[in-house]
Image (cartoon, coloured by chain):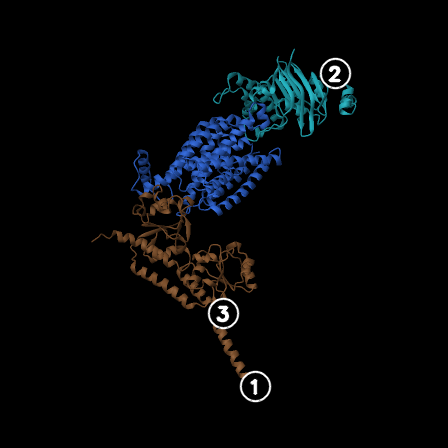
Chain colours: A brown, B blue, C cyan
Amino acid sequence: MSKKLVSLFLAVLMVFSIASSLAEASAVTVTDMHDREITLAEPATRIVVMQPSDCEILCAIGCEDTIVGRGQYVDYPTSVLEVPVVQSGAETNVEEILALNPQVVLMNDMAQSEEQVKQLEENGVKVVVSSATDIEGVYYAIRMIGKLMGKEENAEAVIADMQATFDEIKANSKNEGKTVYFEVSPLQWGLWTAGKGTFMDELAEICGLTNAFADLNDWASISEEQVLARDPDFIVTITMYYGEGPTPVEEIMSREGWGDLKAVKNGDILNAESNAISRPGPRLKDAAIELYNFINNIKAEEVPAA
Amino acid sequence: MHDSRQLKRERFTPLTYLFLTVALLFTMILCICVGSVSISFSDTITAVWNAIRGVPASGSITGNIILNVRLPRVLCVTLAGAALSLCGAAMQGLLRNPLADGSTMGVSSGAALGAVIAMAAGFTLPGFSYGGIMVTAMAFAFGSLILILSLAYSLDHSLSTNSIILIGVIFTMFISSIISLIITFASDHTRSLSFWTLGSFSGVNYDQAKLLFIALVICGGILIRFSSELNAFAIGEDNARHIGVNVKQVKLIVLITVSVLIGICVSISGTISFVGLVMPHIARMLVGPNHKRLLPASLFSGAIFLLLADLTARTILSPIELSIGVVTSLVGAVAFVIIFYRTRKRR
Amino acid sequence: MTAILHGNQITVRYGSHTVVDNLSFHLKEGQWLMLAGPNGAGKSTLIEAIAQGVPYTGNIQWEGLDLCSLKPAQLAQKIGVLSQKNNVGYAYTVEEVVGLGRYAYRSGFFSSADDHGRSLVESALEITGLTGLRHASMLTLSGGETQRVFLAQVLAQNPQVLVLDEPANHLDLNYQQQIFSLIREWLKEPGRAVLSVVHDLSLARKYGTHAILMDHGKSISQGIISDVMTPDNLQQVYGMNVYEWMREMLSQWQR
C-alpha cells in the first residue's frame, strides 16, 4: 500500500476523532427536576418556555433570543411579549408547540399530562421539567437551565448575585421576634395567607421576620379574626392594583376593626410586587430587597434625629 | 270516639314558639362567643355591652373582633338563614313541591349570575353603590324562576315534582359554567367562583345586615300575609281558584317577593344550598304545614341552622376557614335523606 | 222563575280543535242539570269554562251579571266546584282543608272565621260524616274519605250553584249513594241548583231533573231529563240502543 494512502487514512481518522470529541464536548446532559435525564447534542437554540419564572431565568442568563414560544402568563421582561404565545397548563396544545419547531420545551409538572409530554418527545422535542418550591430549588433550576443553554458561567453569576443579596440582608437583619402577615387574597375575595413552605415565608425569614401564620402550610384560607388576634407588626399584600378605587393598602386600612392593628396604625403595610415575590426566579432577590427596605425604612424613621 | 289518626298539633304552638325563640337567642349568643379566636365569655359580654352603650371598641383586640367581625356576621347569618328558609317554605307551598327551594329551582344561581354580570359591567345605582348588583340579581332571580317554570310546564303539563327539580338542577349547572366563564374574563371585579357557588359571610358589615333586615321585614311580611293563599295552593291551583283565590296574582306576588329576597341574600353571601330545602321540612315537623305557623317557624329554624353551619365553617379547621356551603351541603344532604325516608315510612 | 245561570253561545277552542261548539244553556233554581255524553263530548271543558278556568267566546251570565267580570272571591261565593283531581300533598288536617272553603268570605288578613262561617264548617263536617276525623291528617285518608273532605269543603263554601265533575268516579257504591243523597238534600234549600257531569246514565236519570246531552261539543238535546234521554237521542249520541242495553243490565238483578 502506498504511504500516501496510509497517511490520508490516518488524517481522516484524526479529523473524525477530533470532530467527535468536539461534538462530545458540546453535548449537553441535564437532570431535570423530575429526575429525568435529557441529552442534547449541543446547547439549545430554540426553546419554548411555559412558565414565567423560567423565562425570567432564561433572560437573566442572556438567552432571550432563543425563545421561540412562551406560555400564556409569561410576561417579564416586557420585550418577551413579542414572542408568540402558546396555550399552557391543561390546555396545552402540542401541535401549536410543534409548529414553532423548538428543540426544547421548558415546563412545569403541574398541569401538563404525561400524554402531552410523550407526544412532544415522540416528535423529537425534548421536555425539561422545572419546578422549584424553595430558594434552593430556584438555584437548581438556574443551574439546570444554564447547562441546557451552554451558559453555565452566566447562571453561576445570577446565582451568586442572588445569594450575595440574601446573605447581605441576613447579616443586617436580626430576628427581633417581629411578625409579618402576608395577604395573598384580600377580604372581598376570601382572605388567604401564605404560610410555611412558600417563597414569601422564606424571604420573611431572611429578613429576620416571623410569619404570623407559620402554623399553616402553603396558601390557606383564614378567618378574619385570626389576623386581628395575631396583630402582626407588618402586613404585606400582593393584591394587584388596576387604577380603580382604593389601593390595596388603602383598602386594608379602611377595614372595620383593622384600624387598631399595629401595622395599620403605623402604616406598616406594603403592596409588594406580586410576581417578583411569588415566582421561583431571579427576581426573588428584588422582592427581598423590597421587603428589607420596607421594614427598615420604618426603622430608620424611628431612629430619633440625634 | 277518638280516632288514632288525630294530630294534636294545636296545643303545642305557643310553647313551640317560645322554644324556638329561646333556641335562636341561645344560638346567636353562642356564635358571638365562639369563633376561630378564643375570647373569654366576660370579654365578650364587655364588648357587646360597650357596643350597646355606644362606646367605641378601639384599642381592644377582642373588642374589635367581637364588634367588627363577629357581631355583624352573626346578624347577617341570622337574617339570611331566616330569609332563605322562608323563601323555601313559600315555594314549597306555592308549587306543591316538597323539593322546591332557591337552589333547586335555579333561582339562587340566576341571582348569582345577575350579580356577577353587574359586577363585571360595573353597573351601579346613583347614591347606592351596591344597588346595581342587587337589582340585577333580583331581576335575574325572577327571570330564572319564570324560565324554569315555563320550561317545566312545556315539558310536563302536570308540573310534576320531578321534572321541575330536574330542570332547576340542570339550569343551575349551566349557569355555574357561565358564571365561571365571566369570572375568567373579569376576575378583578367579581368575587371568586367558590364565593358564588359555596357562599361566604366573611367580611360582612352592618350596612349589609341593615339591608337584609329591611328586606326580610318587607318580603317576609308579604309572604306571611299570603299564608291563607299558600295554604289554598295545597289543594291544587285549579281548586284554589275554585275557592276564590286569585291564583295568577298570588303566584306573581309570591314569586317576585321570593326573587327579591333571594336576590339580596345571594348578592351579600353567594349561593347557599339546602337551607331553604331542609329547614322548612323541620319546621313542618314541628308546627305542621299550615303556613300561618309554618312561615314564622321556618324563619327560626333557618336562622338557627345557618348560624350553626357558619360557626362550624369558621371553627372546625381553625385558623383555616371553610366555605359555609360545604357545611350546609354536607349536613343538609344527610338531613334531607333522613327526612325523605321518614316521610315515606310514615305513609 | 228566571235562570240563575245562563250560558250564551259558548265556544272553547284548543288550537284548531273545537271542544265546545256554540253551546247555550240555562240553569234554574232547584234544578239538577246533568251533563251527559260520550268521552270527548266536551262536558268537563264546559264545566271549566263556567268556572272561568279556560278562555271561551260567548258569555255566561249570573242573574244578568257577566261571570268574567267577577273577582275570583266573588265568583266562589256563587259557584262551588268539586273537580275530579282532589288531593293534598302535606299533612293538613281535615278541619283545615274544609275550612279552606271559607276563603272567599275572608274580610282581611287578620279575620278569623266568623260564627256563621264556623257553623257552616261544622255542619259541612257533620253532613259528610267527618266530625270524628276532623283532626286526622289528609295523608292518612282513603280515596273516599278524601273526596268527602272536598265535598265538605265545597259545602262550607256555601255557594248557590254546585258544579260537580264526576263526583263518584272510581269510588265505592255505598259512597256513590251517600254523596248523591247528600247533594239531593242540599238541593232542597231554596235558591240552589246543581250542575254535574255524570258518566253513569242511570245515576243521571235517578237524581237529575234536567239534562244536556252533548256530542262533539254541541248540545244535541236540552230540557227535562226524560225528554232528553229518549231512545233516539241516545242512539244518535252513543251509536247504540241504550235502552236495550240498560234493560239487559237490569235483568241481571232480577234473579
Indicate the amino acid at tag 2.
Asp
The image's mark for residue A138 is none
Mark 3 belongs to chain: A
Mark 2 belongs to chain: C
Q: Are both tags, 2 and 3, on one chain?
A: no
| Mark positioned earlier in the residue sequence (1 or 3) | 1
Vertical side of A220 occupied by B29: above or below = above
Disc 2: which residue: C227
Q: Position of residue C213 (x, y in %)?
A: 72, 21
Q: Position of residue B228 (x, y in %)?
A: 52, 25
For marks 1 and 3, give the CA distance: 34 Å
Q: Residue furthest top?
A: C1
- Is C226 left, or right, of B106 in this rendering? right
Q: Nearer the viewer, residue B174 or B227?
A: B174
Residue B243 appears in the figure: yes
State the residue at coordinates (50%, 68%): A39
State the residue at coordinates (69%, 22%): C22
State the residue at coordinates (61%, 18%): C66
Q: Quadrant of the C terminus of chain B?
A: top right
Vertical side of A80 occupied by B248: above or below = above
For marks 2 and 1, give the CA distance: 137 Å
Disc 1: which residue: A5
